[in-house]
């Protein structure tokens, strides 16, 4: 019985630490309202859209998929990835995890 209690206490103490490993970043409430109004992100937050990061739900919802014509300007996407546009950047993300694979400048041709 004593071992079971100790095990339960250990599980309760380690669960919050495991939950914090999620790299998904959320916008602060003020910036989220600004984005919802269609305004641009401040430069510091634009830099958080970096290779290896996971897009938060708010940024992912703001991202627009590229049209067929726009996709032709970029190298072909691998299966399970897609190209999205956020403001003046085009990003390649994994569809299931929303992890940013590439950050590209928008091609204007």
Image (cartoon, helix red, strand yellow):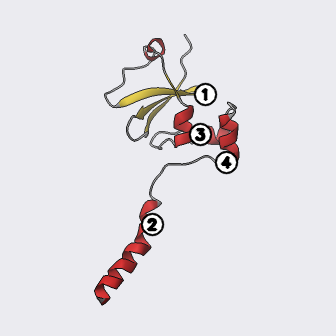
Label 4: state its secondary structure.
Answer: helix
* CA gap, disc 4 and disc 2: 24 Å
Instruction: Name the residue carrying label 3.
Output: 47
Percent x, y for residue 50?
51, 39
Q: Is residue 41 visible?
A: no
Q: Quadrant of the C terminus?
A: top right
- Label 2 close to label 1 by CB (< 8 Å): no
- Label 4 close to label 3 by CB (< 8 Å): no
Q: Is residue 69 visible?
A: yes
Instruction: Name the residue carrying label 4.
Output: 29
Q: Quadrant of the N terminus?
A: bottom left
For mark 4, does the 10 Å Cα neighbourhood hold few (<14), some (14 to 19), or many (20 or more) residues?
few
What residue is rendered at 57% in x and 42% in y?
A: 48
Q: Please give the label number shown on residue 17.
A: 2
Viewer-nearest of labels 3 and 2? 2
Give above or below for 104 relative to 4: above
Label 2: state its secondary structure.
Answer: helix
Mark 4 vs 2, N-terminal side: 2
Front residue of this view, candidates 49 and 32: 32
Percent x, y for residue 79?
31, 28
Mark 1 vs 4, N-terminal side: 4
Mark 3 vs 1, N-terminal side: 3
Corner quadrant of residue 33: top right
Instruction: Name the residue carrying label 1.
Output: 87
């Amino acid at each position: 019985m004593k071992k079971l209690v100790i095990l339960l206490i250990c599980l309760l103490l380690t669960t919050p630490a495991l939950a914090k490993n999620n790299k998904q970043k959320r916008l602060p409430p003020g910036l989220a309202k600004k984005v919802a109004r269609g305004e641009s992100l401040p430069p510091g937050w634009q830099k958080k859209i970096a290779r290896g990061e996971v897009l938060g739900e708010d940024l992912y919802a703001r991202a627009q998929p590229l049209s067929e014509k726009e996709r032709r300007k970029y190298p072909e996407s691998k299966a399970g990835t897609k190209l999205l546009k956020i403001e003046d950047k085009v990003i390649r993300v994994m569809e299931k995890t929303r992890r940013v694979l590439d950050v590209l400048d928008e091609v204007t041709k």
